[in-house]
Amino acid sequence: MESDKIKVLVTGVTGFLGSRIANSLLEQNYLVRGTVWSLKNKDKLYPINSLPHQENLELIEADLLKEEDWDKAVSGCKYVLHVASPFPTKSPKNENDLINPAVKGTTSILKAVSNHKEIKHVVITSSIAAIMHTYHNHKKEYDENDWPDIKYIIPYNKSKTLAEKSAWDFYNKLKQENKLTFKLTTICPGYIFGPSLIKTDFSSGSIIKQIMMGELLGIPKLYMPIVDVRDVAIAHIKAMESDITDGNRYICTSDDGFWASDISNLIKKEYGKFGYKPTTLNVPYFACWAASWLDGQAASACSMWGCDGKFKNDKIKKDLGLTFISGKEAILKMIESLIEFGIIPNLIKK
């Protein structure tokens, strides 16, 4: 472990994944500089300010849409973990509200990194959204060579795809010009569940909350390749510390996936006895299609309706030596933390 007094930049440090990565780095004696949108939001900062080894944590403001913020942010760091990217619970009216910060933020950070030769490795959080296709050209098995067709994907998937492609374009251009001074790796997680360190709402937690509290009108026929947030954090750090990951993208999912109906049935089995009444009604496609005209979340479900493609995780297992926490544990641990933080009401008799 080479962590003694080495500084790592973690963008989006107050998020579900960013906070877990920061926690793992601090536990391994790294110095962590985390970027936040504002230092004035005390509720958002509280969980980060509660992490261990605060003496090794530094928080600074940086905006994905402001290129001038990133030279200062990366300065003095040996590694950069770019985790920040908009992930709303509902699709925006204008897809560029997602695409612009995702793409511009990624390219701005890499431009800044290219001016600092002390930076050894950049790891970017991409997504299986930058790999998976829709029902228009669905596949049964995906690997790291796959990219979606931009014409058929929803705004979030498009933002992740264009951001990752912009990173590889920038990297390859520097490589061709013999100006490349850093290594680049992208991690493509599935739906990230697992225990949360933050007490505010976040997208994957919102999915579980809506199912558990019966807030959805019905369960779509949606297959979810799942990964535990703790495994995704480990993957970022192992990729950062490795030389063999340079120039590679990695699918990061557990060995098992769940249909949305499997998740609702699991919640009913484990928590129904305490008075929770999760949504269990399977919604037909035509109802989802009708709702998609008014609701971005429904539109997202429709685009992936019935797609049960498997994601090969043998490459990340081989190169990084990962063994994955089960999807079931990731789901149940997330629920425990959401109840603990009051995001889901506690109906369990103590």
Image: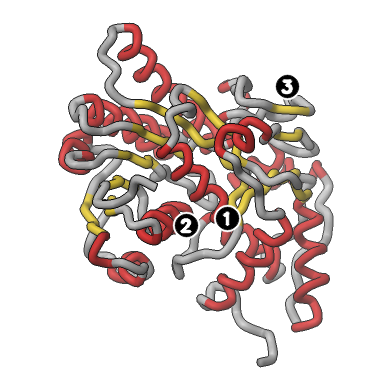
Task: Report the coloring of the rendering.
Answer: secondary structure
- Residue 272, by quadrant, is bottom right
Q: Earlier in the sequence, mark 2 or mark 1?
A: 2
Say the numbered circle drawn on residue 137.
3
Callout 1: few (<14), some (14-19), or many (20+) C-alpha neighbours within 10 Å? Answer: some
Where does the image place residue 5, in percent across and percent down from the top left?
A: 24, 51
Spatial separation of the CA atoms under disc 3 and disc 1: 26 Å
Residue 94 is at least partly visible in this image = no
Residue at mark 1: 204
Q: Is residue 276 left or right of residue 83?
A: right
Q: Is residue 90 above or below residue 264?
A: above
Q: Is residue 205 above or below residue 75?
A: below
Residue visible at 80% across and 55% down in the picture: 261
Q: Amino acid at mark 1?
A: Ser
Residue at mark 2: 16
Residue visible at 68% across and 71% down in the picture: 213
Where does the image place residue 32, in percent across and percent down from the top left?
A: 29, 53
Q: Earlier in the sequence, mark 3 or mark 1?
A: 3
Q: Which label sits in the foreground, 3 or 2? A: 2
Q: Is residue 342 above or below residue 314?
A: below
Spatial separation of the CA atoms under disc 3 and disc 2: 31 Å
Where does the image place residue 42, in percent across and percent down from the top left?
A: 28, 70
Q: Which label sits in the foreground, 3 or 1? A: 1
Please tell me whether mark 1 sits on a helix, a strand or a loop: helix
- Residue 67, by quadrant, is top left
Q: Are marks 2 and 1 in contact (CB under 8 Å)?
A: yes
